[in-house]
Amino acid sequence: MIVSKTGYKKIQDMKNNLSNELASLMSEVTEAAEVGGNLWHDNFMYEQLQVQIRGKEKELLDIKEVIQKVDVLEDDIFLQQVPLGRKFICDINDKLEEWTIVDLYLSDPSKGEIAYNTPLAQYLISAKVGENIIIQIGENNRNIKIIEIDDSGLAKQNE
């Protein structure tokens, strides 16, 4: 999996937050055991905290596995022709839209930020200014014309 430096920082922040949440739950479970008189099998709060701890431990393990598998994309390395963070202005079915190709952990389609591995991004990554692309989404065809590719450098990745 490829991520930008910003995406990698976000993953690390998620890991740190999970570690903090887990530490907090561990202290709560100790308190719950004391309040319940060490009768853990009849202590609902204790049992609920144990379930939450197991969930957080699983999330933490998952995020650590992701961290081990990622390749951090340096700012000057390109995915095919377009680096992560490159903005495009497209005419999609006669409506101008701005898109930015980002890594998985920064993707937010409602803001025009799409992950590099989505089908739409794959078409845009290989496109050139003036090129018309027809993409089928569901049962609808979308006609996309690349109007402009931001050449001012990486848009969001370096913020």
Image (tube, helix red, strand yellow):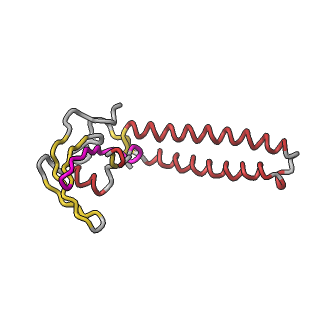
* Quarter of the image with the C terminus in it: top left
* x, y percent for residue 101: 29, 45
74 part of magenta stretch: no
Relative to residue 117, is residue 132 drawn left or right? left
Please give the name of the residue rendered at 33% of the width and 53% of the height, measured from the top-left corner: 117
- Marker count (numbered): 0
Question: What's the magenta region?
Answer: 93-106
Q: Nearer the viewer, residue 126 or 146?
A: 146
Please give the name of the residue rendered at 14% of the width and 55% of the height, measured from the top-left corner: 132
Please give the name of the residue rendered at 79% of the width and 40% of the height, measured from the top-left corner: 31
| Residue 44 visible, this angle | yes
Relative to residue 11, is residue 76 drawn left or right? left
* x, y percent for residue 21: 63, 40
100 part of magenta stretch: yes
| Residue 2 visible, this angle | no
Q: Residue furthest front?
A: 94
| 91 is higher (above) or lower (below) than 15 | below
Q: Residue furthest top?
A: 159
Please give the name of the residue rendered at 20% of the width and 48% of the height, measured from the top-left corner: 90
Relative to residue 112, is residue 40 drawn left or right? right
Q: Residue furthest right?
A: 37
* x, y percent for residue 98: 25, 44
Relative to residue 108, is residue 94 drawn left or right? left
* x, y percent for residue 7: 41, 40
| 64 is higher (above) or lower (below) than 5 | below
Q: Residue furthest bottom?
A: 139
